[in-house]
Structure formats: C-alpha cells, structure tokens
Amino acid sequence: MSTTSIPDKKTSKHRLPTYLRLAAIFGLVVAVGFIIFSLFSDRKPEFRMTSLPTTLSEDVVAVVNGYERRETEGDRVKYYIKADKATTFSDNHQELENVFLQVFNQDGDGSDTITAAKSKYVPAEGNDFTAFFAGNVEINSRDGLKVNTDQLAYKRNADVAEAEEPLVFERGNIKGSANAAKVNIGEQKLELLSNVEIETADISNNGSDSFSKTTAQYALYDHKAEKITLTGNVESLFTDQKNGATETAKTNTDRMIISLKRSLDEGELGESLSDGMNVDRVDMNGNVAIDVVQGGAVATKIRAANATHIRSESYYELAGTASIERFSGPNTSTVGGDTISYFESSAKAIVNGNAKAAQGTSAIAGGRIVADFFPDRNLKTIVVTAPAVLIDISEDRTTDVRANDLTANFNQQGFVQTAKASGSPVAILKPVNESAYTKVTMNSGRSIDLTFRAGNAIEKMISDGRTTIRMDVPNNAEDSANKVVIADTVRTFFRADGKNLERAEAVGDAELHIEPLRKLPANFRSVTNAPRFDCTFFAAGNNPQNCDAGVKTKTVRTPTVPSPERGVQTISSDRLTASFIENTNGLSTLAAAGNAKFVELSRNATSESFSFDNRSGVLSLRGKEPTVWDDRARARAKEIDWNTREQRTSLRGGVSTTYFSQRAAGDSTPFGRSDKPVFVTSDSAEIDHKTQVAVYNTNARGWQDDSYIRADTLRIEQTQGRLFANGNVNSLVYQNSGGTKRDPVNAMAGKMSYHRNGRLIQYEENVDMRRGTDRLTGRVAKIYMDERNEISRSEFDGDVVVTQPQKRATGDFARYDAVAETVYLRGAPATVDDGANGRSAGNEFTVYLKSKRVEAESRSADSGSTNGRIRSVHKIKSN
C-alpha cells in the first residue's frame, strides 16, 4: 500500500512562481518551434504525389553542393539538371534542392524546363527517370507554355508531367487554372482536370479588345494544334469592346473546342509589335446556349444542339433545333430550324430545314430562310423557299400566305411592310369569328404581293398569273352563298383597319362564281364571265356588296334543285353588276346594261338593261323595247317584269305580243288561220306562264291578218282554249271561201268570249254585229264556228234588231245561218219593216239575205200549232 504525501500550504505557495516560469519557458519554446517548422516547411516542402515510391532508400552515400548533371547521346544533349544541393542514396535516387531541369527535344533545337524548390530524382533502366517536384514548381515549355503548381511528377520516357494539386498556367495571352493537370511536354498538350478555368485576351491594334473566360470540368489544351477542348458544364464569357461599347456572349454547352490563331500585328515599318494567340473558332456540342448581352441586357439568345462560332468573322454555324432570338425594345425577332448560318457583323441569318422566323404577330416558315436584320436587331427582310409560309395573327383574323418562295420586308417598328409570294402562292384570310366574317382565299398562278400598313394591317394584295379569290361565307341563311372570282390578275384593297376588304379588281378573262351553300329550289349556282370585275365590300365582314363586270358579260345560272319548270339561266350583256345582301351574304340583284339578254329553257328576254332580283326571282327589263319570248309567243313593252320563279310576266307601256301561230296560242282566239301568227297589243299585260293565261289591259287589241278584236281587256287562256274580252269590245272577222275573202263580220259589245272546245264566240251587253250592209243587234250573241274557224251560224237573244238597207226586223231571238245566208227571227211578235212593201208582224220570220226575201210564219199563241197560219211572201225590191 502506497501513500502520497500532501505538501502543506506554505510549501505550495513558495513553489508557484517556479511553475509559472516553467510554463512561460515552455510556451516560448513551442512558439519558436512553430515558427521554425513553418520556415522549414516553406523552404523544404513535402512531397505529396500519389505516384511517389514508398520504398526509396534512406542511406545517404553522397552529398554534393552545386550539383550539375548533363545527359548526352553522342553530341546531342538529352537533358541537363542542376541543383544547389544533391543528396544521393544507396538505391541511386537523389534528392535535389533548388533544382533546375532542362529537357531537350530530339533535334536539340528546343527545350523544356522545370524548376522547383525540391526534387526527388528516381532513375530507371537506360536513361529513363522519374522526377518528383515540390514547392514553387514551374514548367516552361519550348512553345511558350508556363505552368505553376506546388507538386509535380515528371516521367522522362513519356515526357509527361502530372500535377495533382491546383495549378495555374499561361501561354502568351492565354492563362488559366485547374485542380489538377497532366502536361504532355513531348506532344505539347496540357490536360486540365477538374475545376478548369481558362482566360484569353485577344491581341489587336484596331481599337477593339476581346476577352474570354471559360470554365469546365475538363480541358485539353493542344498548343501544337492550337486547340482547347473543354467538357463538363462548360461555361464561357466572350467579351468584346468596340468603340467604348461592351458586348458579352454568355455560353453554356456540354463540350467546347476553342481554336486559336496566331495574331501578328505590325507597325508602320513592318516590325513585330505583338505575337500571341487569338480565339479564332469555337465549336460547341450539346445543349448550346449563348446569350449576347449589350448594355447590361440580353440582346440575342442563341440555342442549338451544336454550334460553331468563327469569331474573326463574327459568324455562327448552328445545327440541331437551332434558334436565334434578337431583342429590340418591346420587339422580339426569332429565327430557327435544323441549321442556321448566322453572320453577326452583317446581321444576316440563313436557316435550312424546318426553317422558322417570327416577329411580333408574324410567323414565317419554310424549307430555307434567309433573314436580314436592322442594326437594332429587328427583322428587316425574310426570304423563304421550298415551301414558304407567312402567318400573321391579329385580334380578328389570321393571314396565312403559302408559296414555293416568299419574301417579306419589315419596317423598323418590327411590322411586316411588304410580302411577295411566288410559285403557286395561296393567301388565306381566316376570321376568328367565323359566324360573322367571310374567309377569303386567294390562289395565283405566279405570285401574290401583299402590302401592309403600320401595325401589320393589310393594305392590299395583288396577284400575277391566273388567280382565284374565294370568299367562304357563314352558313347562316337559306340564300347564303360563297363567292369565287377568277382572273389573270386580282387586286384586293383593304380598309384602314387592315381586316376588312374594301374593293377588289379582277382583270383579264374574269369569272365570278356564286355558290349557294344550300340546295333549294330558289337557289342557283352561277358563273359570270367578263373581261374584268370591280367589286366593292361592305364595311365589315369581308362580304362583297357589288361586283361590276366589264364589257360583254355572260352569266350562266344552274338550279341547285333541277325541275321541269326551272332550267339553266343564261344572262348576257355589255355590263353586269351583282349586288349582295349584307346580313345573309346571298345574291341580291343582277343588273345588266347594254344589249341585255336572259334565257331559261325556251324562255328568252332582251332589253337595253334589266335588273334581276334574286330574292323574288323578278327580272325587270327596261330600255330599247324590252322583249320576252318562248317557242310559242313573243312580247314587247316599254317595261317588263318577269317573275322567273313564279313564271309570271308583267308588261307595261305599248305592250305588243305575237303568238307565232293560232295553234301556238292554243287555238284560244277565234281567228281563221291556225298556221298564221296572232298579234295582241295593249297598254299593259299580265302573263302567267304556268297556267298559260295572259291578260291584256287598256286598249287591248288582238288580230290575225285583217281580223281583229279590240277591248278594254283581253284574257287569253291557252290551256283551256278560251278568250275573254271585256269593255268596249269591237271585233272584225273575215270569212274565207275558196281562198277568197268574203265580207267581214264586225261585232261590238260590252263583253266577248271564245271557247275553243265548243267553237263558240259569245258577245254580251249591247251586241252590234255587222256584215256588209247587214246589221244585227241584241243583248247576247253566240257565234258558232266550223272546223276552219269560220262562222257557221250565229244566235242572238234579247232585243234583237236586224237591219238591211230600207228594211228593219226585230224580235226576241235571231239565228244567222252562214251557209244558207239566212236569218231566222222569232219574237212576240217579231216584226219586219219594209220601206217598199210595208210592215209585217208575226211569231217567226226567215230572211233570205241572198234572194232578198222574207218568209213570215204565224203560230198559235196557246199551242204553238201551225194550223190556220197565214203566210205572206213579200218581194223585196232592190234599190
């Protein structure tokens, strides 16, 4: 068992100063030791290379101060080493201080040097060796590369130096750093590993300076080939200063190759002023993103899968979903495609494959695009080929232009100013609100020129070559109809808003097509041909208001629903105006002027001018004796309104109708010759072509040869074979016998009718009929015709009066026999007044017109029996 003595307090108090003095001395020793260690460490750095052998001998065999060694092969020096101190160990390796190593190339005309504070030299077979350097290691290559690091391993056989710790390097105007590196001195390559940073400062004497700074995870600087290859999160800043302005290109990519080019500036006498390497070309591969910054803001964005930048020519070659965005104030201009050749200094881009360009509301696409920019980066000119598309989108409509080739010019405000589409071009104006606006499509054989107002408002479109302009309307009414204009050249002009058509000119073998959207009996497809058309449009909707056709027009209208009553309509005239309805887009009227003619089936109409109302189907003919006719009849008047839909015709003013034959009139007139024409005139007339009824009003007169009928009104019913005359009827009918005219029969009455089936003419109201000197009057007269439409007999009822020269007969009934030329008279009583032989009265009389005698017969009033009758025969004496 051990015991420990405890000092008393007095003893401890006496020892305290001693402890303090010992602690102070110990601290001083530690501080001095730390300083000495630090100084020793600075002067004699440690070797930390992973490749340093761990089995080197520690047995010193020689120490040499002022060491030098030169290795030769024949007369050629291979390398030279010197050091302040050289320590040789038993395994022949050496440790050198303040070492200098110079390695010569095979030709002996160049060398590379390595200096360091400390080195370990490890020989190998032959003249090979490995040298490890530490502390302020510096490599100076024969081609000007300088590398500084703290640890380095050099293998003589491979002529490669490896730095495992951070280093910096420079070569002329190029410098950089990395966490580690491999210097292939023989192949003149610097391989930078991890955290790479490279800077360049281009040398120039033209007043411009260029700088670049690039970072990556890996880089290979081949200074023999003058190329720097970088990979892994490559980021680069290329800065150019020209005339006081700074432009920086921020670049990101997966892989970058910087190609350098020697720059040699010369003074006035030709002496060399500087000799360095400038960045000539930059190749980028994978996810290329370049942002060009000017004045602190991004001016241009470049994107591509791969890119090449020729800096000396300010040229970019982009490939793989490439795009360039250029910003100018509120405007952005963009080009993109499979490949882009971008000439930055001349502000030009050439895009090939799936090419696209856009600025503001305009988008352009094609197989190839050549784009020129204004100095402010706005698009100036676009040339598109194979094929080309220009699309401009506004609030109300989309303009779509397509062609084999297209050129668009922009103004400095960023809007399209002019565009020219060539090679089967198509221009489409598609409304956003399709229920209110008409879609307009223009196709041309050669080209379409578009001119825009400010703000991309279209001013005009002009075509060259056979052109079709189609106007597709909303299907919002029964008469809605698309319109198509075809001509050699079409010019369309827009209102100030740029969305609504104002007028259009179609010149050269022009055609106007009207195509109803619905098949209805009232709708017709029509085609108008003329040398030119001039069309005006309603204020909104792109709907035509009027289309005026030039000289010698022809229109063909085909029913959408065929029927026996409706056929193809043909309209021809010197000029034609088609007017349309604004709210339905359907055809309103066709106005023809100058030698106007209308034809449908066998029906025809001509006049100086006419207006056709498509809604009612009424054709109004005016000027130059309007005429209508078919295969049966022809009618003329000062004014004719022909309802082609209802097949009714109204004629006014000097109406004149010609039925080409009595048979053509349905044998509905009482005239004698069935093969000769029948004429009818009046002040006005109404003709129903469906029922074949014609009514002639006021001063109506119908005639054939010398036979006629006059009345206030004539009504001819061809199908039933009837004629009605009303008011102041006056007729004159000649009788023919053996080709010789006989005395005509003239009749006057209040009314007259003729019935073909009964071959009967009936007069009513104050009938007065005369033949030669014979006259018969009465209330009603019935005239019976034979098969030759000649009078066979006549019957008169009511207040009958027969008058001959110096003779007068009266009765209630009279019958005239044209064959026997007798008049049978009956009355209660009937009377005969003979100026020569007196007056006779009786129930019946027979007047023999040819022999000029009268037979009287008396009947019983009660039974009508002739028993006990008295006859008297009077000899009628001639005058």
Image (tube, rainbow, N blue to C red):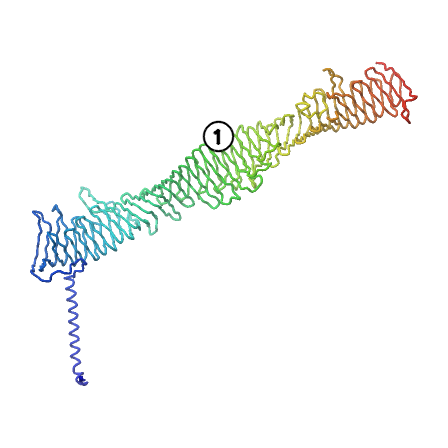
| Residue type indicated by callout 1 | Gly
In this view, the residue in front, 607 or 559, is: 559
Q: Measured from the top left, where is residue 346 in percent x and y? A: 32, 42
Q: Measured from the top left, where is residue 768 in percent x and y? A: 79, 24
Residue 793 as seen in the image, left or right of residue 467: right
Say which quadrant the C terminus sits in: top right
Instruction: Tally the marks.
Output: 1
Say which quadrant the N terminus sits in: bottom left
Residue 480 as seen in the image, left or right of residue 260: right
Q: Secondary structure at mark 1?
A: strand
Q: Which residue is mark 1?
A: 508
In this view, the residue in front, 539 or 602, is: 602
Q: Quadrant of residue 51?
A: bottom left
In this view, the residue in front, 117 or 319, is: 319
Q: Measured from the top left, where is residue 758 in percent x and y? A: 75, 26
Q: Residues within 10 Å of mark 1 (few under 14, many from 20)?
A: some
Residue 120 as seen in the image, left or right of residue 462: left
Residue 67 in the image: above or below residue 384: below
Residue extending furthest toward the top? 878
- Asked if residue 803 shows in the view, the reply is yes
Residue extending furthest toward the right? 868
Q: Measured from the top left, where is residue 353 in percent x and y? A: 36, 41
- Asked if residue 290 shows in the view, the reply is no
Residue 426 as seen in the image, left or right of residue 730: left
Residue 401 in the image: above or below residue 816: below
